[in-house]
Image (cartoon, grey):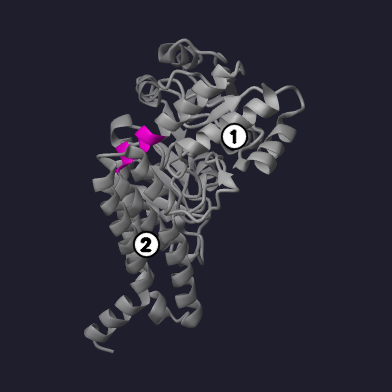
Amino acid sequence: MNSSQSRRQFLQGSAAIFLTAAASHTKLNNAQSISSSSEENYWSIVRSQFAFDESAVPMNAANLCPSFRSVSEAVTALTYDIDRDCSFNNRAKFNALVEESRAAVANQLNVSRDEVALVRNTSEANNIINNGLALESGDEVILWDQNHPTNNIAWDVRASRYGLNIKKVATSADPVNAQELIDTFVSHFSNRTRVLSLTHVSNVSGIKLPIKELVEAAHSRNIYVHVDGAQVWGAMALDLRDSNVDSFSASAHKWFMGPKEVGLLYVKESNIDRIWPNIVAPGWGDEVDTALKGARKFESLGQRDDSALAGIGIAAHQHDLIGTERVEGRVVSLSQRLKEGITELGLELVTPMDPKLSYGVCITRAPTGQGGTITDLLYRDHGIAGAATGGIRLCPTIYNTQDHIDRAIAGLKKLMA
């Protein structure tokens, strides 16, 4: 087969991706002209890029988001393409598509593509760092007690096997400012501290940590800093080069609104060689195999869902069309509207009102033992899907409208006020 035939087959096999992306591009670009006269009209166009029905509005981005239509359509089309022809010859095009996904993600995070591994989810990424760092008995690891279990319990398991010393730091439930949070962690640093492993935004309180300042303080003591960014990737404009984290993890199925079972692990270039992979599959360590250059070694997992990996690039494209700063502004705007409405009802927020100390995760205190019942009724009677995590957890993002927020507030009024 000559090169022109190969090129033609590549375009035919990948047509679905480009067509669905182009359709979204047209809609979102056309909406740009509308947005100057009505911001909400623009966001209604964004909402139309998702398949959910108004009777079941998702407002739990901390757990699972619907994918952009273009993402789910591309993944479906590419899955069919593989089922139609699963030969090495046909699947060869996915090497380029995965690298396009990697480059798009790296560009948004202001890092090198060689520092980005596309793993399966945040849990796997956290465990790669947990298991891969060389630590000795007696070394100290500092954690936030509000970390996700895969950034806490997994460390407990390793500590029990290898004699590590784990410190879990509790912060104020109502912090006054970011400096208070910084001081709390720094006060626990010692000469034995080797790792500081944190969650950027807590899924159980909604508190946002001042990551850049904590990294600076930790690095001054030669402490490695890993950040679980599951609650910020896709919701916040991130610059990992500027924050100077040593490693960062996240999942595409949350705020990034991408394909399921694909995650992100960023490892700063200077740290890649010091971290061992969890899994070694065929091709790892083969000097001829340039596909495993840099952080790619953490993707050595055997057969993957090539369609989902390609879908990461489509999701990144949608974020670029909207603009990551604009996404961030919208998430903050919706969460503040929600928190203000909740406090006006006389209900108690677990999450700080100050956007400098919180982000998209919004939690209302629930009567003891009633969180699950209230959440179920909010969904059944008001069509708002939240969660009973730390209270009544509602996490709006860009597919939510102001009407959705107001509906959630009205539902809480009937159920709790």
Depth check, front residue: 368 or 107: 368
Depth check, front residue: 108 or 269: 108
Q: Residues within 10 Å of mark 1 (few under 14, many from 20)?
A: many
Residue 224: image location, x then y, percent: 42, 30
Tell whether position 198 is magenta: no
Q: Which quarter of the image is occupied by the N terminus?
A: bottom left
Q: Residue furthest front?
A: 37
Numbered label attached to residue 98 = 2
Depth check, front residue: 98 or 15: 15
- Between disc 1 and disc 2, the foreground one is 2
Is 81 on the left or on the right of 21, as rendered? right
Relative height, residue 319 to residue 382 (above, below): below
Q: Residue furthest bottom?
A: 1
Is 322 on the left or on the right of 127, as rendered? left
Relative height, residue 28 to residue 163 (above, below): below
Residue 118: image location, x then y, percent: 43, 53
Residue 61 appears in the rendering? yes
- Residue ID for mark 1: 155
Q: Residue at x 41, y 43 (%)?
A: 234
Residue 163 appears in the rendering? no
Relative height, residue 138 to residue 119 (above, below): above
| Residue kind at label 1, given as amino acid type | Trp
Residue 263: image location, x then y, percent: 47, 50
Is 142 on the left or on the right of 376, as rendered? left
| Residue kind at label 2, given as amino acid type | Val
Magenta-tinted stretch: 323-330
Q: Residue at x 60, y 48 (%)?
A: 55
